[in-house]
Amino acid sequence: AQSVTQLDSQVPVFEEAPVELRCNYSSSVSVYLFWYVQYPNQGLQLLLKYLSGSTLVKGINGFEAEFNKSQTSFHLRKPSVHISDTAEYFCAVSENSGNTPLVFGKGTRLSVIA
Amino acid sequence: EPEVTQTPSHQVTQMGQEVILRCVPISNHLYFYWYRQILGQKVEFLVSFYNNEISEKSEIFDDQFSVERPDGSNFTLKIRSTKLEDSAMYFCASSGVGGHTDTQYFGPGTRLTVL
């Protein structure tokens, strides 16, 4: 079984500053990794994903994440945040056999301060 | 861009009543899912559905829950006798076949409030 740990429940950051949201996972099988974003009162939107290939993946809105197999991590980064990035960010993992359930972390609330 | 839609956006019901939550997955997708998110908690998997049958379910998905694909477009979640602890946001998701089989796309959710 897989599990996902998002160590930071809340991350406040000033506008235009860089941010890193941490995600660690555990699994006995190979996995796919995802970051979803949930804006206030909205559903889950796919930000980016790692399925295979390059360990650095780029997503929407200037976000990127790096898959580190040895550290079982998939941290999300953005070099300069905007007020509009204020949202809840969820890291998720699934087995890489396709169409398997996602296991989510508890989420990190990113608050961008003007 | 095609998207998953869900209705209603908010459902209020009395404890013990039956509710049906509706979803229209992306049209060429073949795998369908329900997840729930209790307020302040993580998103949890309930059930997955493929080829007109349940392919996987979690321990949360007990006998009070059922899913159905009544026609070629809708995918429903029925809760037979709601409990207070069923209050949550319920998300439908779908995924396809081919290059994007491993990416689940989520709907906006239905907020269920059980009184």
Image: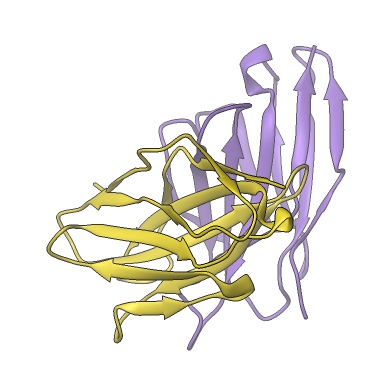
Chain colours: A yellow, B purple
User: Residue A52: image x %, image y %?
Assistant: 30, 81
Q: Is residue B17 at all visible to an observer of this figure?
A: yes
Residue drawn at (42%, 43%) of the image: A105
Q: Is residue A3 above or below residue A55?
A: above
Q: In which quarter of the image is residue B65?
A: top right
Q: Is residue B51 at all visible to an observer of this figure?
A: no
Say whether residue B8 is left or right of residue B54.
right
Q: In which quarter of the image is residue A4?
A: top left
Q: Is residue B80 above or below residue B49?
A: above
Of residues B68 and A104, the one nearer the viewer is A104
User: Residue B113: image x %, image y %?
Assistant: 78, 23
Residue drawn at (29%, 69%) of the image: A67
Q: In which quarter of the image is residue B30?
A: bottom right
**Number of residue marks:** 0
Residue drawn at (49%, 44%) of the image: B45
Of residues A83 and B54, the one nearer the viewer is A83
Say whether residue B4 is left or right of residue B40.
right
Say whether residue B66 is left or right of residue B3.
left
User: Residue B97: image x %, image y %?
Assistant: 51, 82
User: Residue B68: image x %, image y %?
Assistant: 67, 51
Of residues A108 and A29, the one nearer the viewer is A108
Say whether residue A67 is left or right of residue B78.
left
